Image (cartoon, rainbow, N blue to C red):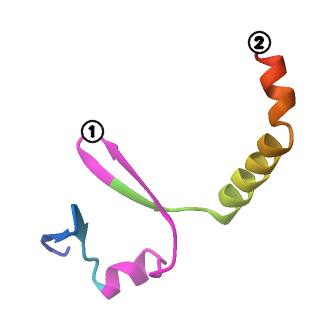
Amino acid sequence: MHTTKLTKVGNSTGLILPRDVLAAADLQRVDEVRIEVRSGRIEITKTVETCNSTMDIGQRFAAHYRRTMAILSK
């Protein structure tokens, strides 16, 4: 178990994760993570690449069919 302090980063608060914690969680500095609070605990989960690609497909679909969706929503 590690102990670390929260630090000020601009108008936000940052958390510095030790290198061995990142390695144990299979995380790197460039990875995207999802942060959730459950029952007072903070959970940090690596975002799965398939989720990102699915979101990209959804955004392209929404952009392509924007007018159709607007008409259907009336």
x and y, in percent, of residue 53 in the image: 73, 59
Instruction: Please report the residue visible at 78 percent of the width from the left and 24 percent of the height from the top.
Output: 70
Q: Is residue 32 left or right of residue 58?
A: left
Q: Residue at x 27, y 39 (%)?
A: 39
User: How busy is the neighbourhood of tag 1: few (under 14 within 10 Å), some, or many (20 plus)?
Assistant: few
Nearer to us of marks 1 and 2 is 2
Secondary element under disc 1, as helix, strand or loop, is loop
Magenta stretch in the rendered image: 19-42
Q: Looking at the image, do the residues carrying marks 1 and 2 touch, with CB atoms under 8 Å apart?
A: no
Amino acid residing under circle 1: Ser
**Mark 2 residue element:** loop
**In which quadrant is the N terminus drawn?**
bottom left
Residue placed under numbered mark 2 in the picture: 74
Number of marks = 2
Residue 40 position, x and y percent, is 23, 43
- Earlier in the chain: of badge 1 and badge 2, it is 1
Q: Taking 13 as reference, is 57 left or right?
A: right
Give the residue at mark 1: 39
Place of residue 54 in the rendered image (x, y in percent of width and height, measured from the top left): 74, 53
1 shown above or below 54:
below
Circle 2 crowding by C-alpha within 10 Å: few under 14, some 14–19, many from 20: few
Of residue 43 and residue 14, the one placed in the foreground of this image is 14
Q: Quadrant of residue 15?
A: bottom left
